[in-house]
Image: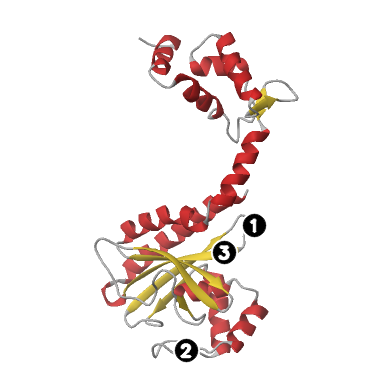
């Protein structure tokens, strides 16, 4: 059976009131800011009078309201719920699914970090089921600004004057022979990272560890955190490094887009 009758049968198999209300709300999108009663009836496969009853219930509960030019638009109750969601939805909740996907895609350890003053904090991590690497980052651990791909990315998009002040005031530790501790050299490195849009480090924090990091931006375009991959450098080819870099930048963009949706 096809057409409206089959759709009606399908709806009768579901929790009709709740599901139909959700289907009505699901009709809205960037290109559909207003819907009509006729469109609702057609979508639900019901008589127009039945469609209007559902609409009136949503209006009474402030999920819909009449649009000035006719039809119906989303109501203020949804704006209130969106504000509540933004307050209760943190960076980790948004990022963790993407971190897991990235770890599976590159078969390496993935980190989520944020700068707090002159320290970098590891907020979360996702482990590969194939490769594991011993690194200095654990959840809740802090590290100085001058070592590691994540730290450099987070500092790179800090105002240069502030970044220089932070570096000059900090005790710049040398973790390996590749760790940069000279402020001028670090400032030049940060400028290069901004130009590239990502950071790549080799054995600068942990011996034989490749780090690849990219910035995560909030809804206002500010760098709020970083996503990075840590891998054993000696087993990663140049081609493999390029693939990791591509995947890290993609993951950072995905998390940034989701943050913008929450902040919007």
**What is the count of numbered marks?**
3
The location of residue 159, given as percent across then percent down, is: 65, 74
Contact (CB < 8 A) between labels 1 and 3? Answer: no
Residue at the (59%, 76%) spot, across then down? 117
Disc 1 versus disc 3: distance between alpha carbons?
A: 10 Å
- Of residue 75 and residue 208, the one placed in the foreground of this image is 75
Q: Residue at label 2?
A: 173
- Residue 224's disc is 3
Disc 3 versus disc 2: distance between alpha carbons?
A: 24 Å
Q: Residue at label 1?
A: 220
Query: Mark 1, mark 2: which one is toward the viewer?
Result: 2
Left or right: residue 146 compared with residue 74: left
Residue at the (42%, 70%) spot, across then down? 212
Q: Vertical placement of 193 versus 11: above or below?
A: below
Left or right: residue 158 compared with residue 95: right
Q: Earlier in the sequence, mark 1 or mark 2?
A: 2
Q: Element at badge 2?
A: loop
Q: Residues within 10 Å of mark 2 (few under 14, many from 20)?
A: some
């Amino acid at each position: 059976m096809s057409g409206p009758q089959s759709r009606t049968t399908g709806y009768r198999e579901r929790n009709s009131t709740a599901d139909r209300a959700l289907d009505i709300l699901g009709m809205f999108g960037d290109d559909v800011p207003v819907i009509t009663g006729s469109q609702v009836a057609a979508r639900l496969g019901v008589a127009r009078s039945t469609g209007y009853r559902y609409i009136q219930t949503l209006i009474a509960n402030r999920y819909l309201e009449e649009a000035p030019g006719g039809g119906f638009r989303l109501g203020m109750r949804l704006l209130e719920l969106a504000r509540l969601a933004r307050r209760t939805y943190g960076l980790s909740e948004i990022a963790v699914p993407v971190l897991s996907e990235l770890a599976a895609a590159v078969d390496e350890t993935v980190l989520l970090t944020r700068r707090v003053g002159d320290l970098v904090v590891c907020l979360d991590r996702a482990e590969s089921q194939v490769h594991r690497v011993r690194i200095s980052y654990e959840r809740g651990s802090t590290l100085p600004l001058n070592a590691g791909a994540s730290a450099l990315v987070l500092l790179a998009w800090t105002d240069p004057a502030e970044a220089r002040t932070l570096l000059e005031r900090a005790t710049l530790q040398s973790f390996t022979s590749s760790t940069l501790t000279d402020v001028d050299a670090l400032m030049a490195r940060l400028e290069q990272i901004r130009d590239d849009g990502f950071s790549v480090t080799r054995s600068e924090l942990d011996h034989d560890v490749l780090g690849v990091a990219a910035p995560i931006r909030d809804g206002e375009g500010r760098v709020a955190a970083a996503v990075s991959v840590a891998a054993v450098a000696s087993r990663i080819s140049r081609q493999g490094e390029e693939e990791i870099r591509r995947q890290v930048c993609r993951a950072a963009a995905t998390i940034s887009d989701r943050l913008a949706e929450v902040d919007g």
